[in-house]
Image (cartoon, helix red, strand yellow):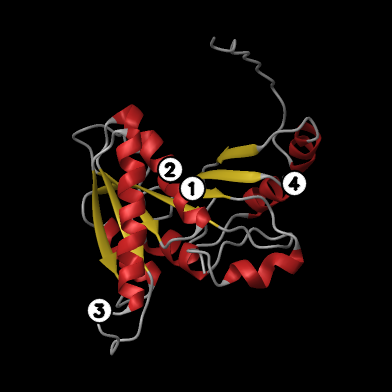
Amino acid sequence: RVAPLTRRRHEVQLSAEAVAKEARKGYGMLLIGLGRGVTAKGGFSRRLNEVAGAFNGSLCLVLKPTGAGRHMPRLGPQSGRILVPVNGTSVARRGAELALAIATVTGAPVKMLYVARVGRDEPRDTVSHRRREAVLKDIVALADRYGVEIETAIRSRAAAADAIARQAGRSVALIVMGVARRPGDELIFGETTSGVLQHCPCPVLLISDSRQPRDDEDREAGRSISG
């Protein structure tokens, strides 16, 4: 049995206070799409910081970097690809799941890009390389469950943001990234996310976990794709 869908429309002035008041009702995720939400340096506008900061749960941010043009892309079988950076963390996998759900509805092609910088002298037959292959194998299995064919690639000789930006310039319509939200009042996802928002020429969709307690910061900072 399908549960009935309830639709409610509320006309309120968007503010941190309004979001905090509504969040007390028990929402699990806040979806935000704001024009001019990203600065030229890949940071977030004051308004976006204030609104997102009023919500402790998961965030889904639809963003247009300053170089992304005026319009959001129309995704479809003949559109540009959805690019999804992954690195084996749970937050990155969540981003992959969201991208696959979007592809299921739109038919847009998907490319999963494993990004993890390693030393130039590291041989390709190391445990690290086998781990990268295992991560992509898991993502392919996930895509099979969604019924979506995907392309995969590994980029490990450059900083993650640079690798993502280069791929974004190759017929990519949308980047979907799972990121870890850092503790504190300011909205921060790490250097990789800032670099992507600063340099990529297409819209970016970020999905984050809930705000972490400060004592969890050190454990997660080194594992997130956003750092």
From the image, tell me which residue sits under label 4. Answer: 54
Q: Is residue 125 placed above or below 77 in the rendered structure?
A: below
Indicate left or right for 138 with 212 as reference: left
Q: Is residue 88 placed above or below 52 in the rendered structure?
A: below
Q: Is mark 2 in CB contact (under 8 Å) with mark 1? A: yes
Label ID, residue 94: 1
Picture coordinates of residue 80, whole percent (x, y):
24, 43
Image quarter hosting the N terminus: top right
Circle 3 or circle 4, nearest the eye = 3
When asked about the image quadrant of residue 201, the answer is bottom left
Picture coordinates of residue 106, whole percent (x, y):
31, 29
From the image, tell me which residue sits under label 2. Answer: 97
Indicate left or right for 77 with 101 as reference: left
Circle 4 or circle 1, nearest the eye = 1
Q: Nearer the viewer, residue 77 or 100?
A: 100
Q: Is mark 1 in CB contact (under 8 Å) with mark 3? A: no
Label ID, residue 125: 3
